[in-house]
Amino acid sequence: MAKVRMIRCAICSKRNKACRSLEGEGPDFCPTINKRSFIGDILKEYDKKEIYHFARMASIQEAECYINRDVKPYVLYPVKTRVQEIIEFSRKMDYSRLGIAFCAGLHPEAKALNDILESKGFQVASVVCKAGCTPKERIGIKEDEKVRVGEFESMCSPIVQAEILN
């Protein structure tokens, strides 16, 4: 049986990473190195006008969140919060409606984000991970595998979140 290499970018310890530099290196599980053909096929999606535009605006937005980009050697120095970045990007894309898919444990933070986005003129839809109140038994969870043994628990369902927001 062939050994399957699990992709584990979160534990990559390479200083000069293959995903960030053409001369970069990667560990044996590096998708940039090991999945070049697969990635090449996926990149064809960027040829679609709307996806190209989205990716281009996202890259421009990323750069605008840092200062002194022309100074060498460059020291990464962010000057905008992620929320500010989202607002600016949404305006670049002419979005007036935004969606927030959030974890039930982050309800206060989702409410704060909702309030900020609304104060900036956006219509905001939001959906919690537990939407649908689907019992954990639906995915084979047993009583002893629940957070609250012996009680009803609804499962997190990012699929439901995405479809509701769509």
Image (tube, grey):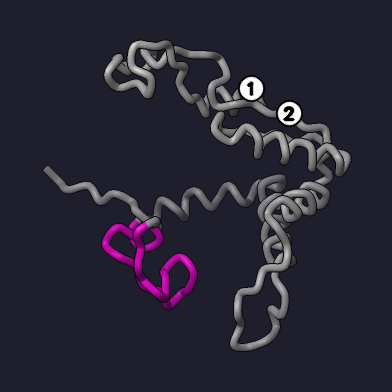
Residue 80 figure quarter: bottom right
Q: CA distance from mark 2 to mark 1?
A: 10 Å
Cβ atoms at labels 2 and 1 below 8 Å apart: no
Residue at x 81%, y 52% (from the top left corner): 92
Q: Amino acid at mark 1?
A: Ile
Q: Position of residue 140 (x, y in %)?
A: 31, 16
Q: Is residue 121 left or right of residue 15?
A: right
Q: Is residue 12 left or right of residue 73?
A: left
Q: Inspect the magenta stretch and tell me whether residue 28 lies in it.
A: yes
Depth order, front residue of 109/18: 109
Quadrant of the frame with the C terminus: top right
- Tag 1: Cα neighbours inside 10 Å, few (<14), some, or many (≥20)? some
The residue that disc 1 covers is 164
The residue that disc 2 covers is 125
Q: Amino acid at mark 2?
A: Ala
Q: Position of residue 136 (x, y in %)?
A: 40, 16
Q: Earlier in the sequence, mark 2 or mark 1?
A: 2
Q: Inspect the magenta stretch and tell me whether residue 105 lies in it.
A: no
